[in-house]
């Protein structure tokens, strides 16, 4: 580095006054440990008188260090002396050794650059003494040499180097002189130099392999040298080559060269894996060697590491020529081992990658020749540089034709697409693909992609063509299938959205159902509880009064207050009855709604007298009508008598449910009227459906008879249509409410805010009418009431029936303002009264009920009807009671057995289903001598539940809540006296 700066005129000093003897002694003292290690007598004599001399401390360290290093290098034994003396105008620094010496004919050449003194011991100095001479000249001094070799007779070998420095600073450039004394005379960079030489001296050939020992200790388990690896060491200094060889010879094969020219010849003649090269050498230096190595293909990737001074600026020129790293002198064994190992492995990988690349290139060539896919390659200008055989085969392009004429061989139908993707690749550097039809009628799928280097340069394109003739039709089919699937997916998505909306509506409806039913069920429950409390309080007071009269043995005459309270009690009991009926209606509507939502609502046809059934339905509302002072008229149309029909076949309970809901609405609406308070119910039968979309009764021509039902119907089963209308005198409905009235939970603005109601009844009515082959409508004008009309389809079994009879309900009341019910179309027909429940012999009834309240109430009702009663709490007790009675009677004629068994279905221990089956089993075996008449009582109105009870063997089914009159009527109608 210093030599390079000298040549460039950039090496200057900063001269300041120093105690020359003291500074020199401090520098020389650093070599004492080296002298002791080599067993050399080492003396430093600077005298007692010191002088101040202007020197550059750093450059002076280099001068003394190099002279001492040179002396220790060539002195194997003997002595080395450092002495300083001062004259009047100058000072002398002498370094004397007893080494090998320098021949006389070489004394004038040793200070020349790259001159080497050769002998049998070692090589002479190279750049070192030349540099020392220049550094001394910078100080305005001179260096003298005296030397003798052992070959000269009569003298001992050795050398004396004398440096003469003038006093003062007049001989130095004024700009480089600093009068500030040196703050510390301790050497600086000399430590590194001493460390280097201390280590170097350990590994010279006389050290017997210590370099390899240290190298072995320096190699870690992560370094993977191989003996087959060949490293070339290039250095003009034989000792340095020997030092480096000692480090690496245990692990790799070492080859040596003393200059760049010899190294280049070796690199050409044998395979190398690494070059360790000095920078400055005679003949051919390091950078020049690297330049030649990079120019030859064989050594183009050979890694080169410069071994030089750590701050050598000439290194940068070497890197530009391709050096991969540098190791600065002085260096440590661990450092050079690690760096050489790293670059050696990288170099081997680089060579392997190059080999793999060549192999892959060959493989790609083979792939291109064997591939059934046509491949092509272009340069950046778009000219084709490669076409594989498959390309020619697919396109039908003549092999001898100019490649750039490929566009002429494309069908005119596809040229625009070809140019589009071609421009997209070369102008926009984008990958593209298209279908191309060639002149040989072959369809191909063409793909082209830009080839862009890592630094972003576009260098051409690569592409391929695939024969898709056979796939063309398949792809069209796939497209059609994909479109169909997309359509199906869209339909499914639409259906899913519809289902989601339906689910939202369903959930909203359920929430509304909960809200409505919660309110509507709680209202009558609250009224029942309150009225029951009133009745209980009055009855308790009356009981206490009678007890007191009995205790005092006095008679009691009822007072007006007591009679008034009893009248209130009767009204309270009527209210309880009406609340119970209201709850029953709501329960029926909720159950029907649930079945509608689950698509489980079914129609079960039974035969019944339509006029009698209608009267019975209206009879339920008698007390409520009386309490609210509302007149009820039942009008029977001409078809009821004109067709001569009494019995029809349809779903009796659903028919009753529709009329019940319409009557409930009519009563609620009419109760708000301050004027006329009247409800008109019309019943009509017709062989024809409505002539339009309304529910109006079509005219009945004279002599018109019933017709058979739709094709496929059996003979003797004509169709009849039942028409019913319920007209109230309430405030009517607004126009905007009519369209919403039959929707779920829609009550109309008037109904919602004024009349209340659940909003379920009319919706259920509409669904029931639809299921029964009819429909329902409303006609209303605000302020003039509303008329609800519906019709259903039925069968007329056993047609023609006997002449019809009937009565019409007449509301009785103590009020004089009540109006009589009548009909403008036919004579009044009173509704049937409660049947006479008394017989010559009372019925003996077995009540099987687990609910104690229901059991007690039912027993009281049976006793009030004049029946005798036995109780059972579950099916097992019922069987035991029947067995006991049968055993006691022992089959005697006239003995009392159970005439009717009322059987609850849901009970603990043994339910009604199992109990009935067991009773029927015993009857069939003869264990029981009489067949029992069993009526099932259940709160589950589901059709499957009713059918299950019938299959178990019951004779009839009553759904809770039931009318006691209807139950008694069934009991008396099904009872058959037993005679033995």
Image (cartoon, helix red, strand yellow):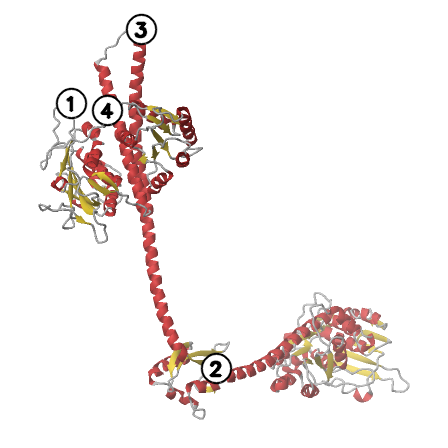
Q: Residue at x 33, y 85 (%)?
A: 412
Q: Which residue in the rendered view is the most extreme toward the front?
A: 980
Mark in the foreground, 1 or 2: 1
Tag 4 near tag 3, CB within 8 Å: no
Residue 754 visible to an observer of this rendering: no
Q: Which residue in the rendered view is the most extreme toward the right?
A: 154
Q: Is mark 2 on a helix, strand or loop?
A: loop
Please report whichever mark, 2 or 4, sits nearer to the chain's N-terminal start: 2
Identify whether 406 is placed above or below 971: below
Please report whichever mark, 4 or 3, sits nearer to the chain's N-terminal start: 3
Q: How far apart are marks 1 and 2 (CA)?
A: 110 Å
Q: How far apart are marks 1 and 3 (CA)?
A: 37 Å
Residue 249, quarter of picture: bottom right
Q: List x then y, in percent, for residue 473.
A: 37, 76
Please report whichever mark, 4 or 1, sits nearer to the chain's N-terminal start: 4
Residue 814 badge = 1
Tag 2 near tag 3, CB within 8 Å: no
Q: Residue at x 27, y 27 (%)?
A: 576
Residue bearing the label numbered 2: 372
Q: Specify whether 678 is left or right of 109.
A: left
**Residue nearest the viewer, comparing 230 with 497:** 497
Residue 571 badge = 4
Q: In which quarter of the image is the N terminus?
A: bottom right
């Amino acid at each position: 580095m210093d030599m390079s700066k000298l040549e460039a005129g950039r090496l200057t000093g900063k001269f300041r006054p120093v105690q020359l003897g003291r500074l020199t002694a401090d520098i020389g003292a650093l070599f004492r440990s080296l002298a002791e290690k080599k067993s050399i007598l080492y003396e430093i004599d600077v005298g007692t008188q010191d002088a101040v001399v202007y020197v550059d401390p750093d450059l002076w360290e280099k001068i003394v260090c190099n002279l001492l290093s040179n002396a220790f290098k060539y002195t194997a034994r003997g002595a080395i002396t450092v002495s300083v003396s001062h004259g009047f105008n100058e000072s002398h620094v002498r370094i004397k050794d007893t080494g090998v010496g320098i021949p006389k004919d070489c004394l004038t050449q040793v200070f020349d650059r790259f001159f080497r003194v050769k002998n049998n011991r070692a090589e002479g100095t190279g750049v070192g003494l030349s540099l020392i001479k220049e550094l001394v000249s910078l100080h305005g001094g001179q260096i003298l040499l005296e030397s003798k070799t052992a070959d000269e007779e009569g003298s001992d070998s050795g050398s004396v180097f004398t440096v003469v420095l003038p006093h003062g600073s007049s001989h130095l450039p004024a700009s480089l002189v600093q009068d500030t004394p040196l703050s510390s005379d301790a050497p600086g960079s000399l430590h590194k130099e001493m460390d280097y030489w201390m280590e170097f001296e350990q590994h010279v050939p006389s050290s017997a392999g210590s370099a390899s020992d240290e190298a072995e200790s320096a190699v870690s388990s992560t370094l993977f040298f191989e003996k087959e690896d060949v490293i070339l060491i290039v250095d003009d200094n034989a000792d340095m080559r020997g030092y480096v060889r000692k480090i690496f010879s245990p692990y790799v094969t070492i080859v040596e060269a003393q200059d760049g020219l010899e190294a280049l010849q070796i690199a050409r003649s044998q395979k190398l894996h690494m070059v360790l090269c000095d920078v400055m050498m005679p003949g051919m230096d390091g950078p020049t060697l690297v330049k030649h190595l990079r120019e030859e293909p064989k050594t183009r990737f050979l890694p080169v590491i410069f071994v030089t001074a750590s701050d050598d600026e000439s290194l940068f020129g070497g890197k530009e020529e391709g050096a991969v790293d540098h190791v600065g002198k002085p260096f440590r064994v661990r450092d050079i081992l690690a760096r050489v190992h790293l670059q050696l492995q990288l170099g081997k990988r680089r060579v392997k990658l190059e080999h793999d690349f060549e192999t892959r290139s060959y493989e790609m060539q083979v792939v291109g020749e064997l591939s059934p896919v046509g491949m092509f390659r272009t340069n950046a200008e778009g000219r084709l540089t490669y076409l594989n055989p498959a390309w020619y085969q697919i396109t039908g392009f003549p092999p001898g034709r100019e490649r750039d004429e490929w566009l002429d061989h494309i069908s005119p139908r596809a040229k625009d697409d070809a140019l589009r993707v071609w421009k997209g690749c070369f102008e926009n550097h984008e990958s593209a693909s298209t279908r191309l039809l060639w002149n040989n009628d072959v369809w191909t799928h063409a793909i082209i992609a830009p080839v862009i280097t890592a630094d972003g340069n576009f260098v051409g394109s690569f592409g391929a063509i695939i024969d898709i003739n056979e796939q063309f039709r398949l792809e069209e089919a796939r497209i059609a299938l994909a479109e169909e699937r997309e359509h199906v997916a869209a339909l499914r998505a639409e259906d899913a959205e519809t289902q989601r909306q339906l689910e939202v509506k369903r959930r909203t409806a359920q929430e509304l159902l909960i809200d409505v039913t919660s309110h509507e069920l709680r209202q009558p429950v609250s009224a029942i509880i309150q009225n029951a409390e009133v009745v209980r309080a009055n009855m308790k007071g009356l009981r206490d009064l009678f007890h007191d009269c009995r205790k005092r043995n006095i008679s009691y005459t009822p007072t007006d207050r007591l009679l008034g309270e009893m009248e209130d009690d009767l009204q309270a009991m009527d209210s309880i009855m009406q609340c119970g009926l209201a709850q029953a209606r709501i329960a029926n509507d909720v159950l029907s709604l649930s079945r509608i939502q689950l698509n489980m609502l079914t129609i079960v046809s039974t035969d019944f007298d339509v006029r009698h059934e209608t009267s019975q339905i209206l009879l339920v509302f008698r007390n409520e009508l009386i309490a609210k002072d509302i007149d009820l008229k039942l009008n029977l149309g001409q078809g009821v008598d004109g067709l001569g029909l009494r019995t029809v076949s349809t779903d009796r309970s659903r028919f009753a449910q529709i009329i019940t809901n319409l009557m409930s609405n009519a009563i609620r609406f009419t109760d708000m009227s301050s004027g006329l308070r009247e409800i008109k119910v019309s019943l009509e039968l017709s062989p024809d459906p409505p002539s339009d979309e309304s529910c109006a009764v079509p005219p009945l021509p004279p002599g018109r008879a019933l017709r058979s039902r739709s094709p496929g119907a059996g003979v003797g089963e004509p169709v009849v249509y039942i028409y019913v209308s319920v007209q109230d005198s309430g405030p009517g409905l607004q126009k905007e409410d009519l369209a919403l009235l039959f929707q779920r939970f829609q009550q109309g603005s008037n109904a919602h805010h004024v009349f209340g109601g659940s909003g379920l009844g009319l919706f259920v009515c509409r669904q029931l009418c639809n299921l029964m082959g009819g429909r329902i409508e409303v006609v209303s004008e605000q302020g003039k009431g509303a008329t609800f009309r519906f019709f259903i389809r039925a069968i007329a079994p056993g047609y023609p029936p006997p002449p019809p009879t009937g009565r019409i309900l007449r509301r009785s009341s103590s009020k004089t303002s009540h109006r009589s019910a009548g009909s403008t179309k036919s004579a009044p027909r009173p509704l049937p009264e409660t049947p006479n429940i008394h017989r010559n012999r009372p019925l003996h009834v077995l009540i099987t009920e687990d609910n104690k309240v229901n059991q007690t109430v039912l027993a009281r009702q049976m006793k009030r009807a004049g029946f005798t009663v036995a109780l059972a709490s579950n099916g097992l007790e019922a069987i035991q009671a029947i067995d006991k009675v049968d055993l006691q009677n022992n089959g005697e004629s006239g003995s009392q057995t159970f005439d009717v068994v009322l059987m609850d279905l849901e009970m603990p221990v043994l339910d009604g289903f199992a109990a009935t089956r067991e009773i029927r089993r015993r009857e069939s075996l003869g264990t029981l001598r009489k067949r029992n008449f069993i009526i099932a009582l259940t709160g589950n109105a589901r059709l499957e539940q009713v059918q299950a009870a019938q299959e178990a063997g019951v004779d009839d089914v009553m759904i809770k809540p039931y009318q006691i009159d209807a139950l008694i009527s069934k009991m008396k109608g099904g009872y058959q006296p037993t005679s033995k």
